[in-house]
Amino acid sequence: MSEPMIPAADAQASLEAALKGEILRMYEEVAEQPNGDFHFFHGRAAAELFDYDPELLDRAPPSAVASFAGVGNPHLRSELKPGETVLDLGSGAGLDGIIASWQVGPTGTVIGVDLNPAMCMRAKANAGASGTQLECREGRMEDLPLDDESVDVVISNGVINLSFQKRKVVRELFRVLKPGGRIAVTDIVSAKQLSQSIVNDPKLWAS
Ligand SMILES: C[S@@+](CC[C@H](N)C(=O)[O-])C[C@H]1O[C@@H](n2cnc3c(N)ncnc32)[C@H](O)[C@@H]1O
């Protein structure tokens, strides 16, 4: 079996830049045109498939539900408690952050972090419509805009797979977690090495 080719540094930098552009474009498109044709599950149908509580989906702002682009349900394991501080890594249009806000209540805090400032604005608007306070910080999961040992729980849904630097992301999660903190992540993993033509295709990676 042949080893995957590791791209040279400049080739990797241009691939990363192309990936970032594709990520910005694709998730904005899901947020702006949720009824469009995408080759991944999204919206209410996806949330129901992943066992989100229909009552919570009815209660959440329709635009947060329509733009949901997660790959699973981190709330099934997060066991959030009132008063906790939660980081929603790659918070997108905000559905998971809003659900987390209801769980931690008025004494808790939910901080979203997203690469895309437009997604942060959308998440904050959706949170406002849901009657919750969701802080959203523009930033990269590889270099989180949070202090050391500042959060009780990290939730994330379909985001870490998008990074070129997954070890760095995991290190960042452990840096910002308080001792004894928890991580509830749903994401995509491949059981086998992907072909180089897939790895080098920003469109496929971004989705
Ligand atoms: C698949 S969507 C998931 C959004 C949300 N968790 C949900 O379930 O709807 C991926 C989100 O991660 C954000 N993202 C992608 N790469 C990122 C990075 N390096 N740092 C922070 N956010 C990133 C994208 O802008 C997008 O909003």
Image (cartoon, grey):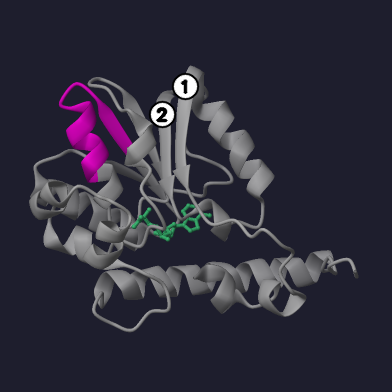
**Residue at 38% across, 68% down:** 27
**Residue at 48% across, 68% down:** 23
Describe residue 104's horizontal placement relative to residue 173 as left or right: left
Categorize mark 1 by other alpha carbons within 10 Å: few (<14), some (14-19), many (20+).
Answer: some
Q: Is residue 29 at least partly visible in the picture?
A: yes
Front residue of 29 and 53: 53
* Residue 80 drawn at (x, y percent): 30, 27
Q: Amino acid at mark 2?
A: Val
* Residue 57 drawn at (x, y percent): 16, 53
What label does residue 82 carry, if any?
none
Could you tell me how far apart the alpha carbons at marks 1 and 2 are, in whole angstroms? 6 Å
Specify whether residue 33 is painted magenta.
no
Categorize mark 2 by other alpha carbons within 10 Å: few (<14), some (14-19), many (20+).
Answer: many
Q: Is residue 33 above or below residue 82?
A: below
Q: Report which quarter residue 67 is drawn in.
A: bottom left
Q: Amino acid at mark 1?
A: Gly
- Residue tagged by mark 2? 153
**Could you say whether the residue bearing mark 2 is in a helix, strand or loop?**
strand
**Could you say whether the residue bearing mark 1 is in a helix, strand or loop?**
strand
- Residue tagged by mark 1? 181
What is the span of residues highlighted in magenta in the rendered image?
A: 98-111
Between discs 1 and 2, the one toward the N terminus? 2
* Residue 111 drawn at (x, y percent): 33, 37
Q: Is residue 153 above or below residue 203?
A: above
Q: Do the numbered discs 1 and 2 sit on residues whose CB atoms are within 8 Å? A: yes
Describe residue 19's horizontal placement relative to residue 105 as left or right: right
Q: Is residue 57 above or below residue 167?
A: below
Front residue of 198 and 131: 198
**Residue at 36% across, 58% down:** 117
Q: Quadrant of the N terminus?
A: bottom right
* Residue 48 drawn at (x, y percent): 25, 58
